């Protein structure tokens, strides 16, 4: 089983539901990322107010489709590099609530669809995902605890890709406050994620647009900064010189199911790396934009 690293992140690999607004990344320090994710209410919103605790029933099931469109630009020493065409991808999954305790909600999921349009090569590459399964656990207030995906038997490239798609599922979880809130409420969450040898520090602000006691709509703003370190990807190491990610996102769901079952996001990541090849140092810059939509299966 492969462990999913979860939080509302904006890593360059297919993250969802993040946002920008004012970018506070310049003020982030290692101390800000120390410890478990912290939720702080800055505005409790209007009356009536309720504790937003999930109340699903074991056996509840929802089928979701996630559509992703990605574009990227890479420059090496200032020269643009050719970029291949990336088709619009649709990944389908069915998620079931397995157990509900006083503190946690445990779910399982299975991929049941992969669609890359007319790109048969890409569809064939991801076809082994169909039928794969995994698990996901949250608190009763929606905060991600952990998750795993069974990637046994996949080649290393596909195994890594599956892990990135599972990050999307983790990001569909919404960390609600443990204190009562109403429409118009806002809360912040600071968290971190480790990937490819780097620590990414994330600051998220959630705005509760609508809440009727069950159904909710949230806007989320997130900024992300990578703490200084060495990037290790595919056996190649590079010093990360700059990293900045931002985007906009929206969650919609009900407290009767522990995932936001619909939403959209638009995320842009910019990074600069210094790497050495044959005794010569090179500068590689990358800009990546990812648009994601999540919706219940029609």
Image: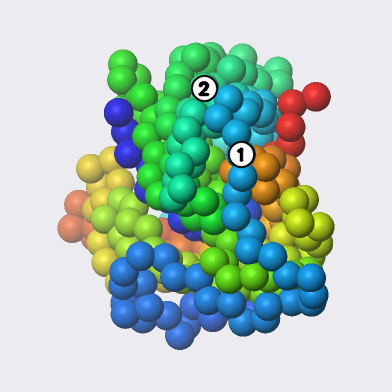
Say left or right for 236 vs 116: left
Structural crowding at the residue carrying mark 2, measured as other residues with C-alpha within 10 Å and reported as few (<14), some (14–19) or many (≥20): many
Residue most extreme to the left: 279
Say left or right for 30 vs 70: left
Depth-wise, is mark 2 or mark 1 nearer the camera?
Answer: 1
Structural crowding at the residue carrying mark 1, measured as other residues with C-alpha within 10 Å and reported as few (<14), some (14–19) or many (≥20): some
Q: CA distance from mark 2 to mark 1?
A: 19 Å
* Residue 228, above or below 57: below
Viewer-side residue, 225 vs 130: 130
Viewer-side residue, 258 vs 123: 258
Say left or right for 41 vs 108: right
Q: Where's residue 83, x and y in %?
A: 56, 41
Quadrant holding the N terminus: top left
Q: Which residue is mark 2?
A: 110
Q: Where's residue 237, x and y in %?
A: 24, 53
Residue at (32, 33) in percent of width and height? 2
Q: Which residue is mark 1?
A: 56
Residue at (78, 60) in percent of width and height? 211
The image quarter containing residue 135 is top left
Identify the secondary structure beneath mark 2: strand
Residue most extreme to the bottom: 27
Viewer-side residue, 15 vs 269: 15
Residue 100 visible to the viewer: yes
Residue 72 visible to the viewer: no
Quadrant holding the C terminus: top right
């Amino acid at each position: 089983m492969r462990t999913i690293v979860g939080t509302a992140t904006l890593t360059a690999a297919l993250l969802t539901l993040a946002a920008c607004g004012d970018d506070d990344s310049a003020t982030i320090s290692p101390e800000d990322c120390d410890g478990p994710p912290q939720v702080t209410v800055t505005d409790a919103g209007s009356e009536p107010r309720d504790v937003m605790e999930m109340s699903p029933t074991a056996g509840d099931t929802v089928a979701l489709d996630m559509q992703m469109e990605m574009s990227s630009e890479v420059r090496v020493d200032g020269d643009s590099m050719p970029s291949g065409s990336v088709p619009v991808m649709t990944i389908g999954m069915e998620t079931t609530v397995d157990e509900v305790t006083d503190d946690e909600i445990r779910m399982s999921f299975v991929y049941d669809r992969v669609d890359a349009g007319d790109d048969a090569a890409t569809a064939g590459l991801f076809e082994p995902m169909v039928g794969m399964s995994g698990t996901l656990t949250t608190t009763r207030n929606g905060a991600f605890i952990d998750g795993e995906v069974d990637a046994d038997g996949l080649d290393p490239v596909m195994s890594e890709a599956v892990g990135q798609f599972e990050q999307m599922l983790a990001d569909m979880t919404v960390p609600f406050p443990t204190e009562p809130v109403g429409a118009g409420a806002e809360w912040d969450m600071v968290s971190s994620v480790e990937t490819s040898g780097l620590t990414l520090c994330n600051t998220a602000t959630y705005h509760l647009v609508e809440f009727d006691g069950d159904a909710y709509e949230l806007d989320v703003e997130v900024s992300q900064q990578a703490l200084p370190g060495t990037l290790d990807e595919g056996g190649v190491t590079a010093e990360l010189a700059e990293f900045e990610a931002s985007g906009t996102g929206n969650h919609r769901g009900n407290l009767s199911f522990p995932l936001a079952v619909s939403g959209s996001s638009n995320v842009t990541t910019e990074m600069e790396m210094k790497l050495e090849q044959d005794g010569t140092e090179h500068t590689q810059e990358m800009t990546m934009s990812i648009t994601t939509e999540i919706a219940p299966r029609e």
